[in-house]
Image (cartoon, helix red, strand yellow):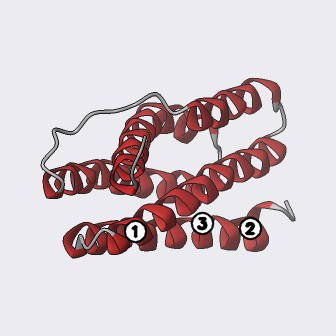
Amino acid sequence: MKTLADAFEHTLQDMYYAENAIAKSLPDVISAVSRKELKTDLTAHLDETKGQIKTLEKVFKTIGKKPAGEKCDAIEGLIKETESVMSDAKGASAKNAALIGCCQAIEHYEIARYGTLREWAKSLGNEEAHDLLTSILDQEKAANHKLTHMAVTMVNNS
């Protein structure tokens, strides 16, 4: 990477890889949780994730590139941690709470990366990419808020 445009493209590839990895792993998390409301929210976020992949494909078009993923070590580690929690947590309440924590770690990573990408798009004068990335960033923030609300009001006290 030599330019901001190079960094933008590389990070966009990371996030494309990450969203596809999340879309593959989220069904296992949905199966692992026992709380109906949590299953419902995670299922809705899986649909959002699939939409985000399509939105990222539009961002690639704004820079004249084909959508392509670059292995994202961070998301690989967060997914591996989530898989460990799924196999290690035995009590339903503990598993639900711990998996919310894992999902929030992923959301926080996504929020950080999309915030960066959005600002880079603006600096590069790519308003279309800026707007598309803002829509994803807003979805990730809302998903994190829902997880926090569910943890505080339903899961952490059970």
Q: Does dot 3 land on a helix, a strand or a loop? A: helix
Q: Name the residue under label 2.
A: 154
Separation (CA) of disc 3 from disc 2: 15 Å
Relative vertical location of residue 107 with respect to residue 70 in this rendering, above or below: below
State the count of labels. 3
Q: Position of residue 89 (x, y in %)?
A: 81, 32
Quadrant occupied by the N terminus: top left
Toward which corner of the image does residue 63 lie, by quadrant?
bottom left
Relative vertical location of residue 124 with respect to residue 88 in this rendering, above or below: below
Under mark 1, the amino acid is Arg
Q: Earlier in the sequence, mark 2 or mark 1?
A: 1
Q: Residue at x 16, y 43 (%)?
A: 65
Toward which corner of the image does residue 147 lie, by quadrant?
bottom right
Q: Mark 3 points at which residue?
A: 144
- Report whether residue 121 is seen: yes
Q: Does dot 2 land on a helix, a strand or a loop? A: helix
Q: Name the residue under label 1.
A: 118
Q: Which residue is drawn at 68% across and 35% down?
A: 82
Under mark 2, the amino acid is Met
